[in-house]
Image (spheres, rainbow, N blue to C red):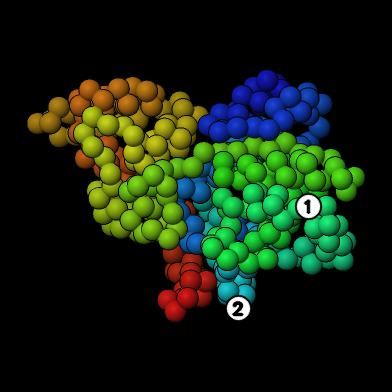
Amino acid sequence: MNPQEKFELIKRNTAEIIGEDELKELLESNKELSVYIGTAPTGAPHIGYFIWGLKLADLLNAGFRVKVLIADLHAALDNTPWEILEHRYNFYSKIIPLMIKAMGTNITKLEFVKGSDFQLSKEYVLDIFKLSSMTSVHDCHKAASEVVKMGTNPKLSGYIYPLMQALDEQYLKVDMQIGAIDQRKIFVLAREQLPKLGYKKRIELMVPFLPGLIGKKMSSSIEASKIGLMDDKKTIQKKVNLADFKEGNPDNGTMAFFKYIIFTLLRDKNEKLLIERPEKFGGNLEFQTYEELEKAVKEKSIHPLDVKNTAAQHITNLLSEIESKRDELEKLEKLAYPKNI
């Protein structure tokens, strides 16, 4: 894979890359590059995580060393009870690798890092103090407002959150950070502030949000909007059946999953999408691209239920790695997300 092919693979299905020219230069250097994504173990993980999971797979295929930061201290700063942090970390560190493995990617260059293993070092804490003396409350609030649960009376912890996320780039020794589009203001803050400490600014890559099954955003706090990574086949089918999907309108979470996840994986395997239907309803259909499926939906030549059933089947298949470890994961999940919290 040449540098241009690597760049195109990295850029696909992204919302924005800050520092595209810098990325192209690094790819031309033929050095081994590294990237990280931080995931704070707050809400239970759901299929929206496949958006960035697939981007990690792209970067692994492009030769990057990929680090996943299980950001336990960030979770605490975002109001996760301190007493269950370790349980949340244990659950995430077991389930996220299975999600990435499900996409058929070689994960030998995939590394998981626990935030508190380096964020409590003397050097890191000193740099946080230095950053706090250089960054205004206004800028911290602006950076954190779309990511941290601020409320009407924000806690000080919410303002520390973006400073730590910026500093993580340096201490994880990476060339690039990945996040969702709501992370943009934190990324801009990082590029502005890290050079003041004598550290280089990094490339920032953002992926879009996967819309919810119901409503516009998939949320851990809205059960009907998401399919959890621990949902079984019956639950997946039920949630997909109840998902928003007006006949003739492809603007919904089910179709978005086809666009960003299913068709991307099928294209990489040079396979078509098969939608199975009884002969009395027209028989099976095949689609080479998402655009073909979208056209069929708009023209009402395929019923939403047929699309939903196919989506449920693909989601179930993607979660099969997790299903095979269900007994172990359920024990961890109960500790991580006790009903009384």
Separation (CA) of disc 1 from disc 2: 30 Å
Q: Nearer the viewer, mark 1 or mark 2?
A: 1
Which of the labelled discs sits on residue 32, or is there none? none
Q: Earlier in the sequence, mark 1 or mark 2?
A: 2
Helix, strand or loop for disc 1: loop
Rendered position, 311 above or below 91: above
Image location of residue 250, percent across then percent down: 31, 32
Q: Residues within 10 Å of mark 1 (few under 14, many from 20)?
A: some
Looking at the rendered structure, the number of numbered marks drawn on it comes to 2
Q: Is residue 183 left or right of residue 311?
A: right
Instruction: Please state which of residues 74 and 90 is positioned toward the viewer in this rendering.
Output: 74
Quarter residue 211 falls in: top left
Q: Residues within 10 Å of mark 2 (few under 14, many from 20)?
A: few
Quarter residue 117 falls in: bottom right
Q: In the rendered image, is residue 76 in sight?
A: yes
Identify which amino acid the numbered label 2 is placed on.
Glu
Q: Are marks 1 and 2 in contact (CB under 8 Å)?
A: no
Q: Residue at x 17, y 28 (%)?
A: 283
Rendered position, 131 above or below 125: above
Image location of residue 335, percent across then percent down: 51, 75
Rendered position, 53 above or below 307: below
Q: Which residue is mark 2?
A: 83
Image location of residue 64, percent across then percent down: 71, 38
Q: Residue furthest right?
A: 198
Rendered position, 136 above or below 309: below
Helix, strand or loop for disc 2: helix
Q: Which residue is mark 1?
A: 135
Image location of residue 305, percent across then percent down: 21, 40
Q: Is residue 226 left or right of residue 82?
A: left
